[in-house]
């Protein structure tokens, strides 16, 4: 069989995205395709799993295996997929509403379980598909039809949560920097265990002010720490605009416990021998 | 007060006039406009003394409503489809605890395959969970049912689900007579909860109940639903006297007096059916329509009485009991005083497929002619089904079913096989 060189175009399907023109999620699709090409993974070696929302449409736009699941459950589905087929590279994708709100519980436990997969959250700080409601990362004073006076609630810090819950790799990228984002995704996929990549992905329709992010982000501002205390200090002083790898830990990835069937009755007899 | 208004906004205005004290909101199409409108009414001060809570999921929405209701507040939420199923555990909890929460369900199909359009799969999935289920025919009735629902819920200490067709009603702008605040205040007394949080008399709610009393608790929920069978028609009459228009009730008949065939349905399809029946009557067919406006409690006596003189019944329903057939029609068969063989099930409009007058007329002509089968899927694309079945016969690894069908249909989003 001829080994043809894979280019980013090989990882895109011919389905036209339904995203609004200018949506940051196009940048994530491009960066993901670039990253997979750099990793030289064949499309059939990759599974992209998502939940519900604008960003969760992304599996259909890739040529990898895709799974469009139930709202908030992408990480659980991705976990099942990875443990059943550890040979596949599993990339779980979604948005801030899907991942931090209705699926927040799975986020905690996916970090804790540390299965070897990559979770990319396209954070635009809004529910876009239902036309502009606040999410857990929305600023307290952002006004919308649903909350005309803002939620009055402080936004969560997903990277701090990931760190506290046990994620093994934590990074932040920006869709306006697709090459940098592609490099982050490469590192995330290569790093063993649960890798979390927060992506600032502007919603030009419901959060047009996020166009300004390109002036606000600071590239390579985060230096990868192997020490979680150091990473925690940095992330709590962070304004959300620093890009790079925050944390690259050394926790052992999840592996199913050695099955009982592999122990023979003789082993057991030996354990209980008087 | 007459207004040209979107269904969702009209419902929000009606709910606001019922003075809810806690409203829980999580966005899901096609319900979102309802809670957005309530958010606006709270922010503008038009709805006072109301906590509006933007929650993290539908499970949280119902759970917050349970907490609020258990503390003695009038609580409201709205959802649809996947949202209703996601909160299902809490929905059962609300009825088991006897909490009079009112919830709008903007009816939408259940996935997979994911589909945002209208059918009744969501409400029907939870038909036996202990909530009263009312179905609106149009936006005027959706408004009026909410006004009735709070009083019904609080009188019986039972939660009430008001079901309205997603998009067809929620997003339709039409003329609605909105009740005034004075009218609603006169109709709906302040909430007198049976259970409140009282520091002087602390109790716990949600006790573990074993075999010694569990059945009795469930029986009492059933008993109270049976009481609703008396209250609903009584209050529908009263409502008509106060507000000057018919809304709610258990069932409402249209041109059934001399009908040989009666079509039974619920929700917005009733309008199309009435138009179709009018046209068929011009052709000389004696057909009538029986609208179900309450599905739980099941109005068996009212249905039996309405169909007592009818030789043939056609139930048109937007839900499917997979492996059985109709859900509504099973209930109708149980109530029909003649042979169940004369009750035909017509599954229609699943996932938002348009139910046209032409299709209904064709189906009803065959019903009147005695050639309609016991179970029919209106406008089913039999060619598409045959292709899928042939494929499955020919090969084992046929891949995801829905995607294969999309390719057969040739929709833009599907890649060639």
Image (cartoon, coloured by chain):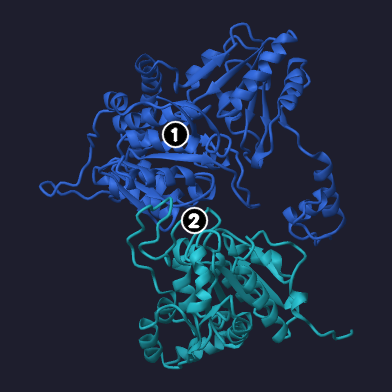
Q: Position of residue B32 (x, y in %)?
A: 48, 47
Q: Which mark is residue B10?
A: 1
Q: Position of residue A241 (x, y in %)?
A: 46, 79
Q: Colour of chain B?
A: blue
Residue at 72 percent of width and 14 percent of height? B280
Chain the render paints cyan = A
The image shows residue B144, relative to residue A253, as above or below, that is above
Extreme-right residue of the structure: A1
Say which quarter of the image contains residue B194: top left
Measure how far apart labels 1 and 2 are at the Cα level: 21 Å
Q: Position of residue B21 (x, y in %)?
A: 28, 43
Q: Which mark is residue A132?
A: 2
Residue at 85 percent of width and 53 percent of height? B391
Quarter placement of the N terminus of chain B: top left
Q: Between B319 and B118, which is closer to the camera in this rendering?
A: B118
Residue at 38 percent of width and 52 percent of height? A148
Count up the numbered dots: 2
Q: Position of residue B238 (x, y in %)?
A: 35, 16
């Amino acid at each position: 069989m001829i080994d043809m060189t894979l280019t980013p175009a090989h990882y895109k399907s011919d389905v036209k995205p339904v995203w609004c023109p200018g949506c940051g999620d196009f940048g994530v699709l491009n960066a993901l395709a670039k990253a997979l090409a750099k990793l030289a993974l064949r499309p059939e070696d990759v599974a992209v799993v998502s939940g519900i929302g604008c960003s969760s449409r992304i599996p259909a736009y890739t040529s990898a295996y895709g799974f469009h699941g139930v709202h908030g459950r992408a990480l659980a589905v991705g976990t099942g997929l990875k443990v059943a087929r550890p040979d596949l590279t599993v990339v779980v994708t979604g948005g801030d509403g899907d991942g931090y709100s209705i699926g927040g519980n799975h986020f905690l436990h996916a970090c804790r379980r540390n299965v070897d997969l990559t979770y990319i959250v396209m954070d635009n700080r809004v529910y876009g598909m239902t036309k502009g409601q606040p999410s857990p990362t929305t600023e307290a004073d952002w006004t919308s039809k649903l909350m005309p006076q803002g939620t009055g609630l402080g936004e969560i810090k997903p990277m701090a949560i990931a760190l506290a819950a046990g994620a093994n790799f934590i990074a932040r990228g920006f869709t306006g920097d697709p090459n940098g984002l592609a490099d982050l995704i490469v590192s995330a996929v290569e790093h063993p265990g649960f890798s979390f990549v927060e992506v600032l992905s502007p919603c030009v329709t419901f959060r047009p002010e996020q166009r300004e992010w390109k002036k606000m982000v600071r590239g390579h501002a985060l230096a990868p720490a192997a020490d979680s205390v150091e990473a925690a200090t940095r992330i709590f002083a962070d304004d959300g605009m620093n890009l790079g790898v925050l944390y690259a830990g050394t926790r052992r990835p999840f592996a199913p416990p050695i099955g009982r069937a592999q122990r023979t009755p003789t082993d057991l007899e030996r354990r209980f021998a008087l | 007060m007459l207004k040209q208004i979107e269904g969702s906004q009209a419902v929000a205005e009606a709910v606001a006039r019922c003075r809810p004290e806690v409203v829980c909101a999580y966005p899901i199409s096609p319900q979102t406009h309802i809670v957005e409108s309530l958010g606006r009414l709270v922010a503008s001060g038009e709805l006072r003394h109301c906590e509006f809570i933007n929650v993290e999921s539908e499970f949280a929405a119902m759970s917050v409503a349970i907490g609020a209701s258990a503390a003695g507040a009038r609580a409201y939420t709205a959802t649809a489809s996947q949202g209703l199923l996601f909160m299902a555990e809490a929905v059962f909890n609300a009825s088991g605890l006897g909490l009079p929460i009112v919830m709008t369900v903007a009816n939408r199909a259940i996935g997979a395959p994911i589909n945002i359009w209208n059918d009744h799969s969501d409400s029907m999935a939870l038909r036996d969970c202990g909530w009263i289920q009312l179905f609106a025919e149009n936006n005027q009735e959706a408004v009026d049912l909410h006004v009735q629902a709070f009083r019904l819920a609080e009188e019986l200490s039972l939660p009430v689900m008001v079901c309205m067709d997603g998009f067809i009603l929620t997003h339709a702008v039409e003329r609605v007579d909105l009740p005034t605040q004075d009218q609603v205040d006169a109709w709906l007394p302040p909430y007198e909860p049976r259970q409140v949080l009282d520091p002087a008399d602390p109790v716990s709610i949600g006790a573990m109940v074993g075999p010694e009393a569990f059945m009795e608790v469930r029986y009492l929920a059933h008993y109270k639903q049976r009481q609703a069978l008396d209250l609903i028609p009584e209050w529908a009459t009263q409502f008509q006297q106060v507000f000057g228009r018919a809304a709610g009730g258990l069932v409402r008949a249209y041109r059934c007096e001399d009908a040989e065939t009666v079509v039974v349905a619920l929700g917005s399809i009733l309008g199309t059916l009435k138009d179709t029946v009018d046209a068929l009557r011009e052709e000389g067919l004696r057909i009538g329509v029986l609208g179900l406006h309450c599905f739980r409690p099941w109005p068996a006596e009212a249905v039996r009485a309405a169909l007592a003189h009818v030789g043939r019944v056609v139930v048109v329903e937007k839900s499917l009991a997979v492996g059985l057939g109709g859900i509504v029609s099973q209930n109708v068969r149980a109530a029909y005083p003649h042979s169940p063989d004369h009750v035909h099930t017509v599954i229609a409009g699943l996932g938002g497929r348009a139910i046209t007058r032409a299709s209904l007329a064709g189906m009803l002509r065959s019903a009147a002619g005695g050639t309609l089968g016991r179970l029919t899927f209106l406008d089913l694309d039999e060619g598409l089904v045959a292709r899928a079945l042939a494929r499955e016969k020919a090969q084992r690894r046929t891949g995801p079913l829905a995607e294969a069908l999309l390719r057969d249909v040739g929709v833009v989003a599907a890649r060639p096989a």
